[in-house]
Image (spheres, rainbow, N blue to C red):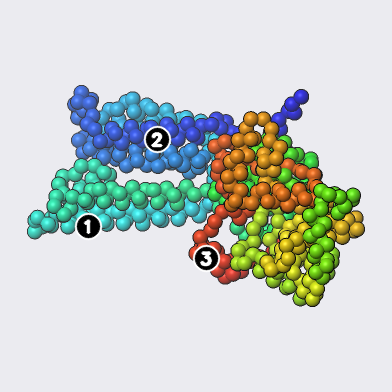
């Protein structure tokens, strides 16, 4: 029995119109460009000669070409649902219809243009992407500057070409030829010798000015960049403590995440925006009754900004709810969850782990459980030093399944299992964050010095299971195993094929080794999903997900510039430190 879909995404009238309108507008633009470059019908031209002055007809003929080009540019932004593009297209279509009548009594072309303008007005609610208030002034200023540069370049070129073969030049000739160049039409002057490139050069300059002005004019609403204010950070922590039951909920305390609240402030989700995709981190947090309203707020937020929606690490429950907002779920992998009760090192299947633990103990290694908030400043610095040595200059990774550092009151109740060698030096640690309202903790970081003996990580995991189990923790969420089901329990005809593809990328992403490591502790597997808006949106969503999780290579120069930008900009207090 199917559930009745919830209205979680507002669908305006003629929701599919923007793509259709974009193609139609591009077609009208192309027709006008062709019409401007070809002679009109002789019979209509003779009739028009009795109805309108020849100068007005020539001016209309010249104006049709740049308007046609402008419609071609506008079609791109109509497909992206830009509201300003809608109204500018309506104005140009209405105007070009009149020009088509003036230049050659092209009644058919005028009728098509006006009909398309009427269609756009009828379906205006489908163009949902709004714009920043200040961008209109900025765009007009840039457009004016670009136009001035194009006019100056064309004028200088015409004057220079005219003086090349004559001692004087007519001002009227310069004006007419400059206008002809800017409108990409034939003028009274022929350019020869060293000036043959001038028409093409001015045409390219004019087209470039048009594209630059369009880019500035049709930019959507800016995405939030500043850290959430203090009151929002406090609200996030409060909602997490009441409703953050999912094993990934605590990772929403990362300071590089933005927050979107439901209208009643009873639920929130955390996100980052990459490559035009708003990626939700894990599941939303809040009571079940507040989540549909939160999803509606999310769809409205992205519609106004022209963003796609995705989610990384979504649970089956969230995937089901998001389906009612038009999102599709792609299996991403499994979270390994180990039960502390009943865990034992006895038996042949866990023999290698038992040997590693015994070997480390004989070498003098020990482990202790500490609350993060109880660490001294010296101990915290030692842990951070271990982390830096492990990363070896690489930035912190993670988005939906890891924290971005240690410290702060927001993580004071998280746990650290610290490993010391026989001399008492800290040589490694595991950091766990709580799943609120249930006796479960999730692994956030696993760090060690690179010169420590093999098996240290196994030793730390085993001691963590034992020590946290003694404190009443019943389950530990360990590493995420990407595509584990495809590799080891594929179903149907498609998953075996996908497993072959995944194995080809194993050497780059260590997929098999992560699965094997987790499997040593005999966990139960909890599936997680990548949510996306459909097949056409999946490649961009997957790219954005890989980027935020730190799996895409970054040029060294870009990384340095971003570090300098972060260090040189005063940041609002981090969520973890309030």
Q: Would you say the residues marked 2 and 1 are in contact, meaning their CB atoms lie under 8 Å apart?
A: no
The tally of labels here is 3
Q: Nearer the viewer, residue 512 or 545?
A: 512
x then y, percent, for residue 450: 68, 66
x then y, percent, for residue 501: 58, 41
Above or below — where is 183 with respect to 36? below
Q: Residues within 10 Å of mark 3 (few under 14, many from 20)?
A: few
Q: Disc 1 on helix, strand or loop?
A: helix
Q: Disc 3 on helix, strand or loop?
A: helix
Q: Nearer the viewer, residue 437 or 529?
A: 529
Question: What residue is drawn where x is 18% and y is 56%?
Answer: 159
Q: CA distance from mark 2 to mark 1?
A: 33 Å
Question: What residue is drawn where x is 47% and y is 39%?
Answer: 78
Q: CA distance from mark 2 to mark 3?
A: 40 Å
Q: Which residue is mark 1?
A: 156
Q: Disc 2 on helix, strand or loop?
A: helix
**Residue 143 vs residue 289: left or right?**
left
In the rendered view of the protein, which quadrant contains the N terminus?
top right
Q: Which residue is mark 2?
A: 26
Visible residue check, residue 266: no
x then y, percent, for residue 365: 81, 68
Question: What residue is drawn where x is 74% and y is 57%?
Answer: 444
**Residue 61 vs residue 378: left or right?**
left
Q: CA distance from mark 3 to mark 1?
A: 40 Å
Visible residue check, residue 556: yes
**Image depth: mark 3 or mark 1 in front:** 3
Q: Earlier in the sequence, mark 2 or mark 1?
A: 2
Q: Earlier in the sequence, mark 2 or mark 3?
A: 2
Q: Which residue is mark 3?
A: 561
In the rendered view of the protein, which quadrant contains the C terminus?
bottom right
Q: Residues within 10 Å of mark 2 (few under 14, many from 20)?
A: many
């Amino acid at each position: 029995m199917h559930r009745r879909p919830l209205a979680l995404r507002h669908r305006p009238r003629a929701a599919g119109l923007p793509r259709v309108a974009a193609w139609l507008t591009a077609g009208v633009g192309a027709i006008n460009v062709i019409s401007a470059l070809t002679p009109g019908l002789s019979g209509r031209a003779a009739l028009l000669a009795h109805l309108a002055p020849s100068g007005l007809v020539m001016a209309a003929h010249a104006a049709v070409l740049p308007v046609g080009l402008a419609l071609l540019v506008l079609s791109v932004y109509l497909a992206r649902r830009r509201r300003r593009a809608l109204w500018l297209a309506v104005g140009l279509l209405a105007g070009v219809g009149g020009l088509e009548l003036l230049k050659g009594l092209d009644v058919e072309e005028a009728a098509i243009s006006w009909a398309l303008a009427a269609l756009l007005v009828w379906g205006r609610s489908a163009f949902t992407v709004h714009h920043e208030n200040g961008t209109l002034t900025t765009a007009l200023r840039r457009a004016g500057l670009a136009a001035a540069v194009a006019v100056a370049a064309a004028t200088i070129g015409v004057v220079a070409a005219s003086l090349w073969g004559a001692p004087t030049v007519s001002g009227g000739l310069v004006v007419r030829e400059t206008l002809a160049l800017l409108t990409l039409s034939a003028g009274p002057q022929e350019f020869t010798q060293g000036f043959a490139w001038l028409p093409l050069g001015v045409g390219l300059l004019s087209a470039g000015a048009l594209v630059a002005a369009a880019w500035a004019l049709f930019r959507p609403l800016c995405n939030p960049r500043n850290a959430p204010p203090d009151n929002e950070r406090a609200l996030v922590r409060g909602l997490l403590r009441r409703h953050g039951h999912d094993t990934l909920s605590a990772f929403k305390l990362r300071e590089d995440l933005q927050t979107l609240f439901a209208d009643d402030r009873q639920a929130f989700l955390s996100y980052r925006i990459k490559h035009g995709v708003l990626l939700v981190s894990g599941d939303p947090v809040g009571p079940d009754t507040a989540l549909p309203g939160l999803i509606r707020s999310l769809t409205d937020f992205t519609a106004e900004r022209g963003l796609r929606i995705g989610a990384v690490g979504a649970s089956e429950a969230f995937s089901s709810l998001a389906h009612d907002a038009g999102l599709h779920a792609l299996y991403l992998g499994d979270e390994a969850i180990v039960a502390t009760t009943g865990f034992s090192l006895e038996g042949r299947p866990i023999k290698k782990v038992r040997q590693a633990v015994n070997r480390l103990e004989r070498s003098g290694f020990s482990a202790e459980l500490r609350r993060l908030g109880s660490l001294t400043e010296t101990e915290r610095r030692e842990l951070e030093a271990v982390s830096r040595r492990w990363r070896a200059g690489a930035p912190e990774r993670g988005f939906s399944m890891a924290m971005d550092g240690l410290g702060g009151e927001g993580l004071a109740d998280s746990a650290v299992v610290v490993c010391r060698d026989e001399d008492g030096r800290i040589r490694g640690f595991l950091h766990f964050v709580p799943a609120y309202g249930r006796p479960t903790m999730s692994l956030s970081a696993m760090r060690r010095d690179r010169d420590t003996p093999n098996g240290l990580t196994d030793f730390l995991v085993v001691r963590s299971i034992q020590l946290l189990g003694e404190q009443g923790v019943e389950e530990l969420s360990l590493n995420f195993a990407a595509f584990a089901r495809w590799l080891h329990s594929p179903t149907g005809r498609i998953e075996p094929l996908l497993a072959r593809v995944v194995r080809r990328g194993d050497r780059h992403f260590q997929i098999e080794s992560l699965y094997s490591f987790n499997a040593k502790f005999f966990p139960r597997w909890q599936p997680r999903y990548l949510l996306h808006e459909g097949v056409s949106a999946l490649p961009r969503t997957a790219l954005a997900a890989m980027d935020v999780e730190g799996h895409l290579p970054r040029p060294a120069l870009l990384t340095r510039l971003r570090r300098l930008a972060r260090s040189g900009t005063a940041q609002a207090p981090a969520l973890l430190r309030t």
